[in-house]
Structure formats: structure tokens, C-alpha cells
Image (cartoon, helix red, strand yellow):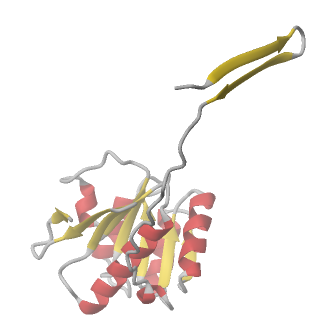
Amino acid sequence: MGGEIGVGSRLGVGSVFHFTVPLLEAEMSPAPAVPLDVSGLSGARVLVVDDNATNRELARRILEAMGSTVTEADGGASALVRLADDPVDLVLMDLRMPDLDGLEVLRLLRDRPGPNRHVPVLAFTADATLGHGSSLEEFTGVVLKPIDPIALAGCAARSIQSAKDRAPAVAGTCRGSAIWTRDNSGALDPT
């Protein structure tokens, strides 16, 4: 490749390794801009449920930057208390929590009367191996950790808008550019 590699070492001091490689400067083409409509997040009331304070704070900061009002719950039981009385437009629900897991909370929420019985609930998980046919089908969609701010905002905005429109197609899994939607039958459909 026309470069060189070398090492310098001094006993008791340490070693320095170095290399050089002549390279051509690459031309970068700009990524195509994909419009992201997050206007549905402005003024939206979102409950972020996660037993990890760092995850809650990161999600809160992203959603608040988009104009949402965010409240937090540090577990399933506290989420159910909040959801019994305080109407929200969206719930971002961690799947694995010590008191009640996200699926248990979702099922209890759907079975009880209250202002949030039909609110969109996005599963919030780091488990990228979860697939179709799993308990995730009961959620409106899935946001994977680590959080991609654009994917979170897009998934949340589409879910809120779909609930307002009562449209059959709802955003599903969001991670980077991987998006799943529900078709008219409610089945997950990769797009």
C-alpha cells in the first residue's frame, strides 16, 4: 500500500506504535433528506415508563425537544396509578421491570376502565431478538434501545397521529431506518 509501520520502545517507559498509509480523499455524497413529520408530538402528553432513570431521562429529553409534555414512572405499578387518572396521548413502556413487566401493565391497562384504556403503547426494549409472534403484537409498536432520536420521534408521532385518525396502519418497530407497520388486519408488515 506504499505506507510504513514502526515501533519505538524504551525500557521502563513504554512503547509507541505508528503507521502511515497514503489514501485518497473520499468524496461524500450528502444523505438524501427524508422529511420527518413530528408535528403530532407538539403538545402531546407522553408517559415514559422505565425502571432505569437514564433511559427515562434520555427519552424525556428527546420527546420534550419535539414539544411533548413528558411525565415519568419508574415501574409498572406506578405507571398504572398515573394512567388511572391522568390522560396521555402515548405511553413508552419498558418491557422488563422488576415489579410488573411491560406486557402485564399493558394488559391491566386494557382491561380496566379509564382515560387511557385505548392509548397507543410502544414497547421500549433492548432485546433486538424479539420477533413476530411474540407478545409484542399486543403493543402499538416497538422502540428499540439504544434510542435513535429520529426513530423514536417518528414512531411516536405516527402512533399518536394514527390514534387520532383511528387509522388502521400504525407505526411499529423503530430502530434507525427499520420500520414495521401494522396492516389493515393488524398484522405486522415490514416496509
Residue plotted at (23% across, 88% down): 166
Q: Is residue 8 left or right of residue 85?
A: right
Residue 164 screen position, x and y as percent: 30, 91
User: Is residue 82 depicted above or below 13 in this figure?
Assistant: below
Tell which of 175 and 52 is nearer to you: 175
Tell which of 191 and 95 is nearer to you: 191
Q: Is residue 160 left or right of residue 68?
A: left
Residue 76 screen position, x and y as percent: 47, 64
Residue 132 screen position, x and y as percent: 20, 53
Visible in this render: residue 107? no
Residue 71 screen position, x and y as percent: 57, 78
Residue 84: quadrant of the picture: bottom left
Q: Is residue 56 left or right of residue 40?
A: right
- Please identify the quadrant where the C terminus is shown: bottom left
Tell which of 3 and 32 is nearer to you: 3
Residue plotted at (34% across, 67% down): 106
Report the residue that reaches farthest toward the top: 11
Residue plotted at (18% across, 64% down): 188
Report the residue that reaches farthest toward the left: 185
User: Is residue 177 depicted above or below 23 in this figure?
Assistant: below
Residue plotted at (55% across, 58% down): 51
Residue 158: quadrant of the picture: bottom left
